[in-house]
Image: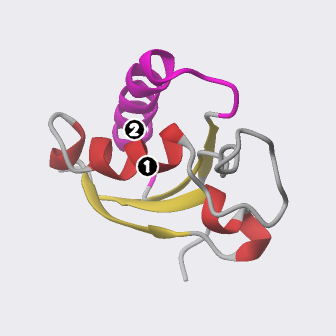
Amino acid sequence: QLPIEARLDLHGMTRQMAEPALAQFLHAQYVAGKRCILVITGKGPGKDGVRDPLNEGHGVLRQSVPQWLSEPPNRSIVLKSAPAKAKHGGAGALYVLLRRKR
């Protein structure tokens, strides 16, 4: 229901690059007073390592980002996350609702 106020695209990043990029982005958006953001993880390659439009989504970032959102320091500013609708990336993206800045 809330408008998407910012987007972070993690496509092409390694796990080592993506985790700090996500933390920095979340903190910056929280400080700016944003509430609803979109984090694009991509679906990742299929089981055989080849991209497939109907892929089951075995991407490293797709699996890791929800975990990172629930760990410190992110969990103190993240209220909730949910899979995105198809028009915003579907299974390869997440809506993230940030807590109100106090």
Residue bounds of the magenta highlight: 11-34
Residue 63 locus on image (x, y percent): 43, 49
Question: Principal SS element in the magenta part?
Answer: helix
Q: Which quadrant would residue 11 be assigned to in this image?
A: top right
Q: Is residue 4 visible to the viewer in this orientation of the structure?
A: no
By what rule are the colours in the image chosen?
A: secondary structure
Left or right side of 13 for 48: right
The residue sitting at 61% across, 23% down in the picture is 13
Residue type of the residue flagged with mark 2? Leu
Q: Is residue 57 visible to the viewer in this orientation of the structure?
A: yes
The residue sitting at 60% across, 47% down in the picture is 6
Q: Residue furthest right?
A: 53
**Secondary structure found at label 1:** helix
Left or right side of 53 for 42: left
Residue 44 locus on image (x, y percent): 66, 44
Q: Which is nearer the eye, 51 or 81?
A: 51
Q: Residue furthest bottom?
A: 1
Q: Where is mark 1, residue-wise?
A: 63
Q: Where is mark 2, residue-wise?
A: 26
The residue sitting at 64% across, 57% down in the picture is 92
> In terms of sequence position, does the residue under pointer 2 or pointer 1 come before the other?
2
Residue 3 locus on image (x, y percent): 61, 69
